[in-house]
Amino acid sequence: MVIASIDLKDGRVVQLRQGSEPVLWRDNAPELAEEFDRYGEVAVIDLDAALGGGGNRELVKSLLRRAECRVGGGIRTAEQARELVSLGAKKIIIGSAAFRVPDKNPGKKEAPGGQAGLAGPAGHTEYAFGVNREFLEALVKKIGRERIIVAVDAKGTAGGGYEILVDGWKTPTGLPLLETARAVEPYVSELLFTCVDREGTMTGIDLDPVKKLREAVSCALTIAGGFSSPEEVGAAAALGCDVQLGMALYTGKIALADAFVRSLNWEKARHAGGLLPVIAQSPDGQVLMTGFADPEAVTESFRRGKLCFFSRSRNKLWMKGETSGNTLQLLRLRADCDRDALLAVVEPAGPVCHTGAYSCFGTDRRYTWEYLQAIIAERFRNPRPGSYTATLDDELVREKVMEEAGEVCTAKTREEIIWEAADLLYFTTALITRAGVEVGEVLDELDRRHKK
């Protein structure tokens, strides 16, 4: 997977060299999140919160509604992490908090992973460095190990090893990278390794510590720092690592489409004629069709914004719907865990199957709440003669919601409850559609409450 980074400072998107020197600023975080989401999860890092400032909470919340995000920066309690998950964060990135522990025995040194370590920097003598097991255990209980990423940001040492840094890479901990990563692994689903020496420099990724870290742990591993070409993305992917891009992406040195293609397991595809299977799925989860793609088809899908395949019968690139007009608008593309199969979330412009059916796996479109809203929205946009839905102005639809709610409450039999509940759902959907509220937003709110 290729992950684009959105680092936030003072309400803006920033890219820093070596974690401190601003190189560029952007004011379009929401638009960037929507664009980056087509290629993979988005890493949203609140730099202000990480440095103890007020943070960019409202902006982060807005990005969580626009993209699949992993969030980091200044998360110091399990409650903070759980709140972000409830707001839609896919994963939580923990940095300094994972390595600061109460220093009950100042000055004492233990092996990495112990509950004490080197004494903290000036002004922080109440802390020592080690693996904060108590905090990580609380985090696992609150949000689950599968949602936890720990950032093991490290810098090379004179002895040839790598030392973990905290506090925005300003404070050395004395904790060696490999041993500490192994100590953290039981609490996480993934580690994020940033090579601090290369971060923001675009001088190329140092694969030596990446290889050693990949051998040291078995959890998922994402690499950041110094990427300067799509070929380097491919080299990291060949080691079984995901890649997080920042400076190279914003300066145009690496295009996300190229990085995405390089991240896929084409070596495995070589045994299947150089093709990877692609599953096309509607936004509400219905499987529409399957096909195959080569690197050109994946690249063209991103370029055109329409799903493209490699046609085995025609032996050439083929865009779905290029003759019928029944194209598949590409919303996002995701690789599976082995990066040898693709899931394309698409919006169909018409029937998907050559038989005229909505899906190649069934004649009818599955009736979902999203589908109901799509029908109602179409009636509002293009009123048909005799359409009852088109007559539902704001006042009338609110009256009907109150009326139907009462009828649901007074219904006696199972059949009556089903009938009246269907009426209530219809009118409620008409009401939220008139208000510009998407069904997905209501479901997201229910999901947020479930995760609280």
Image: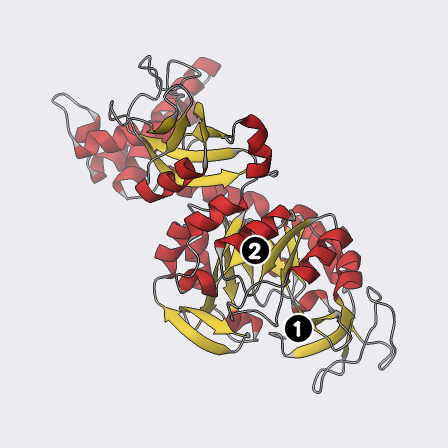
The residue lying furthest to the bottom in this view is: 122
Rendered position, 158 above or below 396: below
Q: Does the residue at mark 1 contact the one at mark 2 (Cβ under 8 Å)? A: no
The x and y percentages for residue 414 are 48, 15
Count residues near mark 2 (Cα–Cα under 10 Å), then give few for <14, some for 14-19, many for 20+: some
**Front residue (pair 210, 71):** 210
The x and y percentages for residue 19 are 54, 74
- Residue at (61% x, 39% y) in the render: 337
Q: What kind of residue is marked 2?
A: Glu
The x and y percentages for residue 259 are 48, 50
**Front residue (pair 232, 357):** 232
Which residue has dot 1 on it? 166
Rendered position, 305 above or below 364: below
The x and y percentages for residue 219 are 71, 48
- Residue at (23% x, 31% y) in the render: 378
Count residues near mark 1 (Cα–Cα under 10 Å), then give few for <14, some for 14-19, many for 20+: many
Question: Would you say 135 lies left or right of 207 here?
Answer: right
